[in-house]
Amino acid sequence: MPALVTSEILKTAKACAIHWEKVDATLGASPLTLRRGYTLANFTTDITALEQRLAQMPDTENAYGIALAERDAGKAPLKARLKQFRAAVQNKLGDTAFLGELPAQPKTTATEAAFLSAFDDMADLWERINAATINGFTPPLTLAKGYSLADFTAELVAQRTTYNKTRQAIADAALTRKERDTETKAVWERIKQYRQGCLAVLDNTDQLLEMVP
């Protein structure tokens, strides 16, 4: 349910609450109640809850957008490191079995598992290269500017953390939207019940009946 629809329903609900106060004042000792003894106080509580939910939405959606941006921003640097790593192995270890174990570049749009798998394979291969005894090569293998396996491991951990944050942000946003929609539908149902309730308790000539939102 779009936020705009919720806002319109909330606006109508507030108008109903104001109208309900007048109805209860008219009815005196027997205030209007809806199904299961639902009162104006209950309605006001639900309106407040929905208002708070709507106020929460921007922060939740912003956190979701930021998490996605951070996740995607971390992909290009990792792919650049893999490109350097492949070049380094081809250059220094092109005549060894390690050449055939080089992981291929994952697609930027690949799933989390598929994307990170290539870099896990890279880290594993790098570790084995550093531990190997190879003629003409002195480990550890480093990339441009002395970039090491430890540096790469830290970068990979950071990217994995952004994936975790993104999953949580997606879940939080989905839950908040679901709760918003559930609360909106509940308030809308009470609005419809309220309109019927007014028809049931107000005299046909009562001006309040013509003013029902």
Image (tube, grey):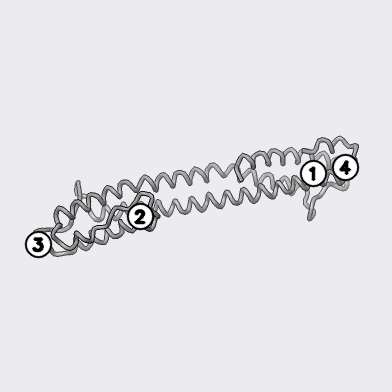
Label 4 to label 2: alpha-carbon separation = 65 Å
| Image position, residue 192 (x, y; %) | 76, 46
Q: Give me the C-alpha separation between circle 2 and circle 1.
A: 55 Å
Of badges 4 and 2, the one in the foreground is 2
Which disc, if any, is residue 202?
4
Give the residue at x 48% y 46%: 64
Instruction: First in sequence, mark 3 or 2: give its number.
Output: 2
Please give the label number shown on residue 195.
1
Q: Are marks 4 and 3 in contact (CB under 8 Å)?
A: no
Q: Earlier in the sequence, mark 3 or mark 1?
A: 3
Q: Position of residue 113 (x, y in %)?
A: 38, 58
Q: Which mark is residue 79?
A: none
Q: Mark number for residue 115? A: 2
Q: Earlier in the sequence, mark 2 or mark 1?
A: 2
Residue in the picture at 34% in, 55% down: 157
Q: Amino acid at mark 3?
A: Asn
Q: Quadrant of residue 55?
A: top right
Task: Please name the amino acid that badge 2 sits on.
Answer: Phe
SS class, disc 2: helix
- Residue projecting furthest to the left: 136
Residue 80 as seen in the image, left or right of residue 4? left
Q: Residue at x 53, y 49 (%)?
A: 173
Residue at screen point 86% across, 46% down: 200
Give the residue at mark 3.
135
Does 206 appear above or below 125?
Answer: above
Cα distance, mark 4 to mark 1?
11 Å
Q: Nearer the viewer, residue 44 or 195?
A: 195
**Pointer 4 or 2: first along the chain:** 2
SS under mark 4? loop
